[in-house]
Image: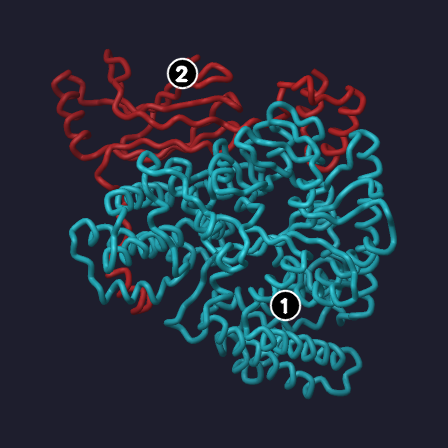
Chain colours: A cyan, B red
Amino acid sequence: MAQGFLALILHAHLPYVRHPEYEHSLEEKWFFEAVTECYIPLLMVFERLRDEGIDFRLTFSLSPTLLAMMEDPLLQKRCRQYLQRLQNLARLEEERTAGDPSFAPLAQLYRSHFDSAAAYLDRYGCRLVSAFRKLAEENYLELITTASTHAYLPLLQLQPESIYAQIANGVQYHTALFGEAPRGLWLPECAFEHGLDDFISELGIQYFITATHGVLFASPRPKYGVYSPILTQSGVAVFGRDAETSKQVWSAQEGYPGDYDYREFYRDIAYDLPLDYIGPHLHPPGMRSDTGIKYYRITCEGLEYKEPYRPDRAREKAALHAGNFMFNREQQVRYLSTLMGRPPIVISPYDAELFGHWWFEGPQWLDYLFRKIAFDQPHVKLITPGEYLDLGYPLQLATPNPSSWGDKGYHEVWLNGSNDWLYRHLHKAAADMIRLATAHSEAEGLLERALRQAARELMLAQSSDWPFIMTAGTMVDYARSRAESHLVRFRTLARQIDEGAIDAEWLKGLEEADNVFPQLDYRLYRDFKTTVPVDLAGVV
Amino acid sequence: MADPQTIYLNRGESLPELYGEDRLVILPRDPHNIFAYWEVSPQTRAALEKRAIEEGCPEIAYCLRVYKYAWPEEETVESFFDLEVSRESNNWYITVANADRYYHVELGWKAPGIPFQYLLRSNLVRTPRNGLSDLIDENWQLPDWKAQKLFRRISLYHLSSAEFFRRLRK
């Protein structure tokens, strides 16, 4: 009998980036890299475990914008082309490094990786959603959703309708793609504010996840800390992030991904090889940016001295770290269970993009971890939050505390001198959207298309990624331009709707450019005073 | 420089700086900071300046009045303080003393011999708590020694704050 539970949660999200106007967009590459380096390697690990009969459970949060990109035919085609270019480059690299005892095996490794990824994409007709859906249907993955464009919800509280629309459309989109409504919600950036749970509950969601102090600082004081969910007044369970497991993976000093035997992320052949050789294979061609082919290990502090990567040593470390992680969980749950009188649940959420992209060996680490948990110990059992709720433990009624998993634990990353200008425009646009949706609740034809497009532009402007990037200070121009463009487009649409003068040709251009969520229902934005909650039953 | 497609779809327009409206909005940022942004419409501003001249005091000062509510409810104002802001500013970070409290803010003006004159009122917000709740549900309580151990385990990895243990010992 297990003494406690471990719920690993991977959150996969990218902002909606799609630029048909460019053949090679640097920003679209975020998606191609994530598909090639993270999602496919992770899916391959899961399928291999399943095929070998190894019992594992994982919760996977897939943001609606990411799903929309996975479903977009243009991005599917471009992603396959991107991978083809990498396959070509890897073959050239095999020739270039032939005979070199350090680098030839690495070139072969990358060639093999890219070939496998390409074969995987082809097997699913470039639709990764099918692969996730299959694993969910087989009960290995619990798929959950998040706000439609990953909006930072606490800072939209001024217009609750826009929070409702963000979550409701996310639930609807997820349900349409996976054939089943999500049981759980990933709060973007784990950001909670009083009242959010009311909308979440209304939409049939059973649980969400907060930062550690979202539950720890709940009121009344949570009897079991973060090791058991609490229940809000509106009837939603809240799971708090476990800080120990976060630290073991994320900590700059002690985190596993920083081990000297692991692959160095920052040393890519894009910067080492002559432009006339590598230029045609870059994305965009001729512009030095990462290829994903990296031949060195971290080796030591700093970026100067690096030794060649040794996959065998890295694999040993991944196994060692998986063993260490499991050992620590065993100790943790055994200790906690003596205090609690019920099995503790350890909630370990991570960004999915850590695994494979930043931490090359991450998928391998997960593979070892799942195998070790299945075979090497009896104390810890993998579980999903949904399965934990099914066990039927009584939950303490408490109100979670406003918080986020960002720096300093509250909203500062998304609200500071670099990005605070954005909110007056977002709030104004949301107020206009509510007014328009309420005034035209039965629109058809061109008016309906204009209202739907206005809702898309607003949602795209609300993405938490733009203020985050402004704070981080890289690609700021892109983030600013995206937020401004969507808001400007929204304003023009709103004006045209008000004036009854919708420019059909221009609208068609917008629909093609910002084509996220084809079925988005603008009526989700109607003023609460004029509506009753949407019944999500039967939306499939 | 934006590409032709973006220029076409944006119709060459950019975001206005302001919307010609009267509004004051506050957002809680963390337990001790509230962000405020506001806009005073040209009409309101003109009316205000006309009145100031009539009152014989052309030099008025814009001011934010920050109201704190009695814990834990949102009905009774407990106290307030004023922050002078420049005529040109349209946002401010307000540092407040209390976590887990309701606040609202008013934008107004003052002049020598004239007390605070209200112009705009904000929404109501509540700052987050920054420590363990003092509220204990008797039906959901571990024995003290177990609670100490459990919370210490979390604090080892999460909180370095002495506040944590100080509050726990209460």
**Quadrant (top left, top right, bottom left, bottom right) of the N terminus of chain A:** top right
Q: Nearer the viewer, residue B85 or A201?
A: A201
Question: Crowding at label 1, few (<14), some or many (≥20) Cα neighbours within 10 Å?
Answer: many
Q: How far across and how far down the image is residue A464, in percent?
A: 47, 49
| Relative to A218, residue A346 above or below | below
Residue B80 is tagged as 2
Q: Nearer the viewer, residue B125 or A279?
A: B125
Q: Which residue appears at 26% of the width and 49% of the height?
A: A442
Q: Which residue appears at 55% of the width and 75% of the height?
A: A125
Question: For mark 1, what is the residue?
Answer: A40
Instruction: Work out how far the residue at label 1 is from the one at label 2, CA to CA, in angstroms.
Output: 57 Å
Residue B113 location, quadrant: top left
Which subunit holds the residue at mark 1?
A: A
**Are labels 1 and 2 assigned to the same chain?**
no
Q: Is residue A470 visible?
A: no
Residue A309 location, quadrant: bottom right
Which subunit holds the residue at mark 2?
A: B
| Relative to A126, residue A502 above or below | above
Q: As shown in the figure, which amino acid type bears the numbered disc 1? A: Ile
Is A432 on the left-hand or right-hand side of B75? Answer: left
Residue A120 location, quadrant: bottom right
Q: How far across and how far down the image is residue A516, in percent?
A: 41, 60
Question: Crowding at label 2, few (<14), some or many (≥20) Cα neighbours within 10 Å?
Answer: few
Give the structural element (helix, strand or loop) at label 1. Answer: helix
Q: How far across and how far down the image is residue A285, in percent?
A: 49, 78
Q: Which residue appears at 53% of the width and 40% of the height?
A: A191
